[in-house]
Amino acid sequence: MIIDLRSDTVTKPTKGMMEAILNAETGDDVYKEDPTVNKLEARLAAMFNMDEGLFFPTGSMANQAAIKMHTQPGEQLICDKWAHVYNYEGGGVSFNSGVSCKLVDGDRGMITAQQVKDAINPPDFYHSPLTSLVCLENTTNKGGGACYDFDEMLQIHHVAKDNGLSLHLDGARLMNAIVAKKEDPKKYGAIFDTISICLSKGLGTPLGTVLIGNKTVMQKAMRVRKVLGGGMRQIGYMAGAGLYALDHHVERLAEDHKKAKQIAAILEAQNYVHKVEPTETNIVIFYLSEGISETKFMEDLSKLDIRISNMGQGKLRVVTHLDYTDAMHDRFLNVLSTYN
Ligand SMILES: *Cc1c(COP(=O)(O)O)cnc(C)c1O
């Protein structure tokens, strides 16, 4: 039994999901003739009370397309210093859009309305790049699955609109936040211009992210997706997995959150652990005590068929997910509490 806690992307389709894949009706999605893709896009757009959705192969591509749609070369976006769009998308912001990032020193990947306000370059000061976009992340990845207070995002929306900026949400794990905070998705649709929602993280599909937004901005989405090479043909098989995930894998995220909190609590009580970040959803970030090597700790776990991630700077990461069973959980908690 291998316990793989490196990421919530390691899951395999369940039996039910495989059936949904096999039974999906498909067509050529580049002609917009795939009924299952169309259904998934419409369903997510409606869930967030937005006009349209567009299916992308990856979350990075959906974010990169959104950035392209909201900016012109030479402009600048504002994001947290830990943002996925800045750290983990291969430099795509500059490669694809010719845009620079103004990094904000946020709290666990979350920034405030005041910080956004302070980061905007004065539009009449032509020496500096024109600020045109704000990117938020909810939940935050490198910030350990932290969730924004909705009110802070609302204030950021006001700052953005007062200054003529677009507002994009990298919602790779947005469903985790919505379940953890018992939020209404429609509230998100009202304050963001675009939202990317990943189906292959906690929701457990093999691939897929849907970018949603209102008509005017989404007009550009098809062309940008084509430019990035993301136009897919009979991809309804994967959209079928997405629809299945929306029916069966959203509420159960609470189970992943519960397990993550239990792992955090056990880690807190161990001498070899220096610090555990607050655990709100399915990600646990912790640091080992001084003198204990992360490499050795990970090797010791690996010998017991347990895999976790090293995020650098002493950060170790555990992510709970659909394929992490109760039996694995018991075993992992036991290993953690007896490790020395
Ligand atoms: C995983 C993730 C993405 C998208 O990653 P892909 O591997 O390209 O699907 C985007 N943003 C965040 C915060 C993520 O965690």
Image: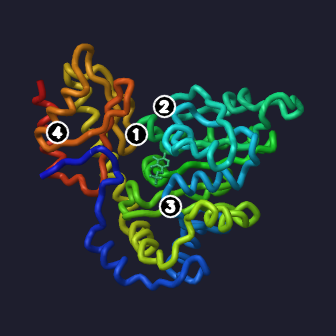
Mark 3 to mark 2 CA distance (whole Å): 24 Å
Q: Residue at the spot x=42%, y=72% of the render?
A: 238
Residue type at the position of mark 2? Arg
Q: Earlier in the sequence, mark 3 or mark 2?
A: 2
Residue type at the position of mark 4? Ser
Q: Earlier in the sequence, mark 1 or mark 4?
A: 1
Asked if disc 3 and disc 1 are in contact, CB closer than 8 Å, the reply is no
Badge nearest the viewer, 3 or 4 = 4
**Above or below for 40 versus 4:** below
Graded by Cα atoms within 10 Å as few (under 14), some (14 to 19) or many (20 or more), the crowding at tag 1 reads many
Mark 2 to mark 1 CA distance (whole Å): 12 Å
For label 3, the residue is 209
Asked if disc 2 and disc 1 are in contact, CB closer than 8 Å, the reply is no
Tell whether circle 3 marks a residue whose Cβ is less than 8 angstroms from ligand 1. Answer: yes
Choose between 237 and 73: the one closer to the eye: 73
Q: Which label number is shown at residue 302?
A: 4
Mark 3 to mark 1 CA distance (whole Å): 23 Å
Q: Position of residue 251 (x, y in %)?
A: 38, 59
Numbered label tally = 4
Q: Quadrant of residue 222?
A: bottom right
The furthest residue to the top:
291
Q: Where is residue 28 in the image (x, y as percent from the top left)?
A: 54, 82
Residue type at the position of mark 1? Glu
Q: Position of residue 293 (x, y in %)?
A: 23, 21
Q: Which of marks 2 and 4 is nearer the N terminus?
A: 2
Mark 1 to mark 4 CA distance (whole Å): 26 Å
For label 2, the residue is 108
Q: Is mark 4 on a helix, strand or loop?
A: helix
Q: Quadrant of residue 111?
A: top right
Q: Residue at the spot x=25%, y=26% of the render?
A: 294
